[in-house]
Amino acid sequence: MKTIYLLSEISRQDSAVFGGKAIAVRRMHEEGFRVPATVCISVEAYKRFVRESGLQEKIQLELHRKQFSDMRWEEIWDGALRIRNMFLRSIIPEPLSREISETVAKQFTDTPVVVRSSAPEEDAAASSFAGLHESFVNIRGIGSILEHVKLVWASLWSDRALLYRQELGLDIAQSAMAVVVQELVSGEVSGVTFSVSPTDVAQGVVEAVYGLNQGLVDGAVEPDRWLLHRKEHTIKEHIGPKREKFMAPGGGGVILKDLPPDKMIKPPLNAEEVITIYGKAKKLENIFGKPQDVEWTKIVSDFFILQSRPVTARQDDDADDKRGWYLSLHRSHENLKKLRIKIENEHIPAMISRAAELAATDLLLLPDTELAGEIETRRAIKEKWTGVYWEDFIPFAHGMRLFGKIYNDIVNPEDPFEFVELLAHAPLMSLKRNAALQKIGAHVKQNPALQQSLAAGDHEKIIDAEFNRLMAEFSSKYGDPFCGTYSDNTCAESRKGLVSVIMQMADSSTLEERKQHSAGRDKKGLERMFFEKFKKGDNRAQAEDLLDLARASYRLRDDDNILLGRIEEQYVLALQEGRNRLKRNNIDAVEQLPENEVVRCLRDPQYRPCLRESKELSPEQESRQMKARQLLGQPAGPGIGRGRARIIRNPGDLALFRKGEVLVCDAVDPNMTFVVPLAAGVVERRGGMLIHGAIIAREYGIACVTGVADATKLIHGGDEVTVDGYLGIVTVGQGNRDLPLNGVAT
Amino acid sequence: MLNEEKLKQEIATLLSDQKLAVLSTQSAGGFAYASLIAFAASEDLQTIVLATPKATRKFANIKNNPRVSLLIDNRSNQEKDFHDAKAVTVMGVAQELAVGGPGRDLVPLYLEKHPYLDTFLRSPTTAFIRVAVQRYYLVSRFQEVMELHIQNENDLSVI
């Protein structure tokens, strides 16, 4: 069956075969609009490709590793990256690639093209989800065009499309993707026109930028904006931004350039042109019978229509629907660069000085009422920074993902997460913290007398000056990792916990052993290989820039949590001091009192909180009949480890951690990663390849499986557990003793 | 009439049509242990290959006792299975084929049939296993059973 067609060969009825975008281009051409030269690749090509390469079942396997509704966005993103890699690494079967190449080569002899998705669903209700699939601009040469056709096919399974899988009617067995390949029409001005504004039905909108549309679409270039009276067809208002940049074709894509001074002061369209392009959008609305969102570019006085699709406001009214927020995490390189400056120059210094400032207040000296105020102030500070964390720190983590995609496009590695190796560059704060603990451990090891008194539990009365100095230095730099995290409200006993971990470190040369495991990987070689793929000039500089950004994103993702932990610690210390005073005033069960009750008691010495029944949950009746044997998660840290499970439910449990155990928890908080080097393996309920637990486990070369649903319920403390970080499986119960651990022969 | 060639042909067809087999191993305690598993068979019927994560019971069992049995059938969970379904019981001896060792040339045989399992197969924690077949028992028409003995040079043991 033929798979590639000229625009003139397709008919209006074929939207299931060529997708909504192709059919719209065909229709506009018929109606006399100027459209770029276009060829259409039917869904049949996609179907043949996935069938013949075995991809069909691979996609199914990937997306059925877990109940879809249980997957977090991070896991969906990871899965989409793996699928994308499968497409990149599969070769288009010879007859199919020849068929596509011949037609494409005939139509576009050495001219740059745009490779666009044309999903069959797009002209149904799902058209409002435009932008869920990918398009690529300025692609040259048949080899590169075929590679980008594969990427457009793969974007049928992009994280964005998967988030909206229900609305799109995505079905692994049935869904397919059509593609249009179009001549790149590179006008001096481009833009988007809405025949009806998505926010006001009485208005229309014209947006325009110098250069290509991509700058406008991904937010890197602020457009000029005109609001029009829909009925009268006249301009109501013009909003001109500070014009600084424009997007131009460059290298194998687009690059952002500085606008020449004469254009900075001149809007990209004059009033007459605004009316002309708005008129075209209105005409398209009449043709398609629905308000249209029209992308165009202008050469001299001619408007080329690049695409037209229905305007529909996305319905994200449901407050529980966080998908819009997740979509917003996809940021452009430019956007992330701005975010980095904000984080490094503003947020981090502010967090450090804020934590230090709070620590300088001697809580013991505050009268009760002032302490009450201090608790509230510190809570407000903690909340403010938690807000910043969601607003800026988490989106910045997308820097890693952006780099990962580009690395995979360029290097085409067997392991889609190979790029993570390049990200560990400067030591993470939590690794430095672990090294500091190890240093204390080494000191303890050299002093048997000290070791004995610590083992005897006399840690309060230690007279060893060097030990006390190291401990003081540690807590001034890193705070108390047992305190203030994981919703635990007490810092008591925390020093004892820390000493217990230090004793474990003293007990062995754990970190040295770990280092050897991870030393075998050739990071320098990978980096060289990556850069060699870029020729000198713009592209190379851009790649270096991106890697630098990704490394900052990786490092800050860890550091920001530790800094946030230090602010939280200050809040918990104040609350704890409040509780201590109430205890001295003979108020019962102060540990269970919520913050507002503690504050009220401090302010009003007469007030006695009424004690509610403590909601101690009785431990669930353990089933004797059912037990988990093998659990599936994500292979987040390669290696294999076996040991007894230690379930971490609160920070206090960390103090019980013994070397060689398997860490099983809901989520590895960066503030608790100090036990990771002691662990034989890490199992986490929260899923993802780029989350803290996985990052730290990889750094130490420890087997790690994340995204194991109900891990802390299905695995019991003391169970023998085998963590297979290559396959992402956790085997509970007696394992195979012949199995070499850490992938190294025993 | 069924002759040896036809019997071989029938078995070969069943083995190539089916993607999954039931593998039976024996636990250290002497219990039979059945698992559903992807397999591929060589054209000459001498060899069946399969793969398993190394932390599994079936792998521990094979290490403990390499004599295994497989069941491959084409039932469709319909009444007609009673007259129509065919099943072949295989007996043989399993051996792990280490990376870089002999027998790894069988990998393409497995991946050609199950291309979607390449990541799984490549994992250092996955064991690739050859079963040197000694005997087939083909069951059809409800109760007709035919035996096929295989002279196998890879057979390291005597059943």
Image (cartoon, helix red, strand yellow):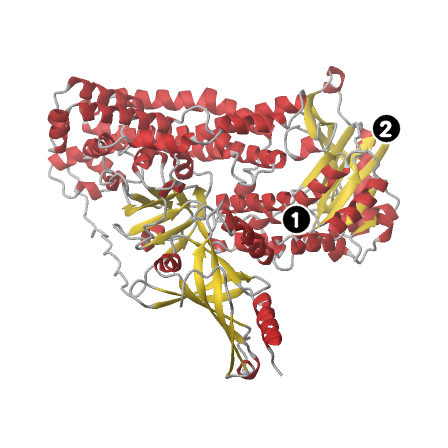
Q: Nearer the viewer, residue A177 or A256?
A: A177
Callout 1 amino acid: Ser
- Specify whether A424 is left or right of A105: left
Residue A393 at x, y percent in the picture: 46, 31
Residue B114 at x, y percent in the picture: 57, 57
Q: Nearer the viewer, residue A172 or A87?
A: A87
* Residues tagged 2 and 1 counted as in contact (Cβ below 8 A): no
Residue A519 at x, y percent in the picture: 41, 29
In the rendered image, the vertical position of residue A512 relative to residue B29, given as above or below: above
Q: Secondary structure at mark 2?
A: loop
The local crowd at label 1, few if under 14, some if 14 to 19, many if 20 or more residues have their Cα within 10 Å, is some
Query: Which of disc 1 and disc 2 is earlier in sequence?
Result: 1
Q: How many marks?
A: 2
Residue A243 at x, y percent in the picture: 69, 22
Q: Nearer the viewer, residue A719 or A354?
A: A719
In the rendered image, the vertical position of residue A718 relative to residue A512, given as above or below: below
Query: In which quadrant will I find the C terminus of chain A?
Result: top left
Quick check: can you spot residue A304? Answer: yes
Which of the numbered marks, if any, corresponds to residue A300? 2
Which of the numbered marks, if any, corresponds to residue A128? 1
Q: Are marks 2 and 1 on the same chain?
A: yes
Quadrant location of residue A489?
top left
Query: In which quadrant will I find the N terminus of chain A?
Result: bottom right
Q: Nearer the viewer, residue A10 or A223?
A: A10
Which of the numbered marks, if any, corresponds to residue A439? none
Q: Residue at x 14, y 20 (%)?
A: A464
Q: Secondary structure at mark 1?
A: helix
In the rendered image, the vertical position of residue A5 relative to residue A504, given as above or below: below
**Residue under mark 2: which chain is it in?**
A
Quick check: can you spot residue A290? Answer: no
